[in-house]
Image (cartoon, rainbow, N blue to C red):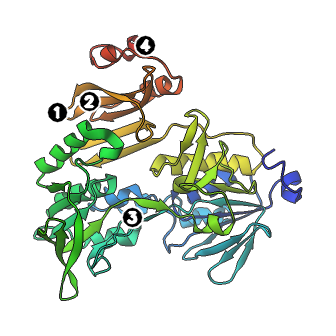
Amino acid sequence: MAGADATPNAADTTGPTRIVVVGGGLAGAKAVEALRSAGYAGSLTLVAAEDELPYERPPLSKSYLMGETSFDEAVVLSADWYTDNDVDLRLGTRAASVDAGARCVQLADGTDLPYDKLLLATGAVPRRLVVPGADTQGVHYLRTRADSDALRAVLGPGHRLVVIGAGWIGLEAAAAARHAGAEVTVVETAEFPLLGVLGPQIGAMFADLHRAHGVDLRLGATINEIVIKDGVVAGVRLGDGTVVSADAVLVGIGVSPDVALAESAGLALDNGVLVDASLRTSDPDILAVGDIANHDHPLLHTRVRVEHWATALNQPATAAAVMLGGDVTYSALPYFFSDQYDLGLEYLGHVPRDSDTSMVIRGDLSGREFVAFWIDRDSCIRAAMNVNVWDVVDTVRPLIVDSVRVDPVALADPSIDYATCVR
């Protein structure tokens, strides 16, 4: 059983009767749902720092930011669901620390929440820009509903937005801003957008995509300061002295796992919270999922920390089963998606940075209808990304999972069936 080497207690022998979940995003909501679906009938508390019902975050930089979907569509479970399923939902409540020895979560208001099992789903926090003027009115980050609402209010014809960082959030927000009619400048230190994730060939494609939609893309550029006029943002001064005028600035330079609670509990940390294949932390009574979980992946044979929707959606079911005594592991391949203008994509698999892989393109890269494959030295597919080509993921998944050796030349030919690309 999970945690068999720990000091025996009631939870170890009879199952938990008190479970606390900390985190008001998709992962937290899916965790309490999975626990009740699995038949757990004990005390169940969900602690959420925001006042909103737990919700999914991808729409904040996509459809919700563009005004195409309502916030209610991003909410995971209704208020009635928590009531009907006897979940003690603590909205607007921040967990301050964890006393792992006493098995107790201390809330910011001084309340103690004892637990037999604790699940941390605390997510990530945006990295802050550190230049003069970065705390000025008009500098935005994008993580919460309030952030998305504030940014949407300054988008539209006649507005000028500078986006700092050409990662996924920055590019999606830039596309949403152009959709709203705003003038957009994207400033990126790398030679291409998404260079560290996708490499120069596909990074160049994304550069062409955004320029084709009117974005002023400044690559290989640095930020010296946020220019201020009358107490609000007026522009961004680049490293070469150029000033880009702006009514608003969005900082999208990545996120950091929110490990403050895990640190207070004395858990093992390294680029997030270290968890085993079953999502247990170094304390067998505490599990972690989502953005913070640095997972010992049983199929990839490496540690993976994934900051994407599918991980938050799928890991909680495994964590719930483990908390209830199940002997299961989480083995789903990392997956994410993005929508920008008329481009939609899905990415499946994992390619560590600086790994020794080559790329195979199947389809029309310049026409932005293709599938990209990352192939290792053994001719095995490690990841695939389909761009404006659909019904690919289910076909490719077993090739990655089973480390099937492929013929790269055949794989690049769209006229050849995937099954015949296998060596």
Judged left or right of residue 34, residue 416 is left
How far is the residue under mark 4 from the one under mark 1? 27 Å
Q: Secondary structure at mark 3?
A: helix
Tell me, yes or no, whether the two marked residues, 2 and 1, touch with CB atoms within 8 Å.
Answer: yes
Question: Looking at the figure, which quarter contains the C terminus?
Answer: top left
| Residue under the image location 30 percent in, 15 percent down | 409
Label 3 sits on residue: 71
Label 4 sits on residue: 422
Kind of residue at badge 2: Phe
Specify the label residue 367 is tagged with.
1
In the rendered image of this protein, does residue 412 appear above or below residue 228? above
Q: Position of residue 305 (x, y in %)?
A: 52, 48
Label 2 sits on residue: 370
Q: Secondary structure at mark 2?
A: strand
In the rendered image of this protein, does residue 409 appear above or below residue 10? above
Kind of residue at badge 1: Gly
Q: Earlier in the sequence, mark 4 or mark 1?
A: 1
Q: Secondary structure at mark 1?
A: loop
Q: Position of residue 148 (x, y in %)?
A: 33, 67
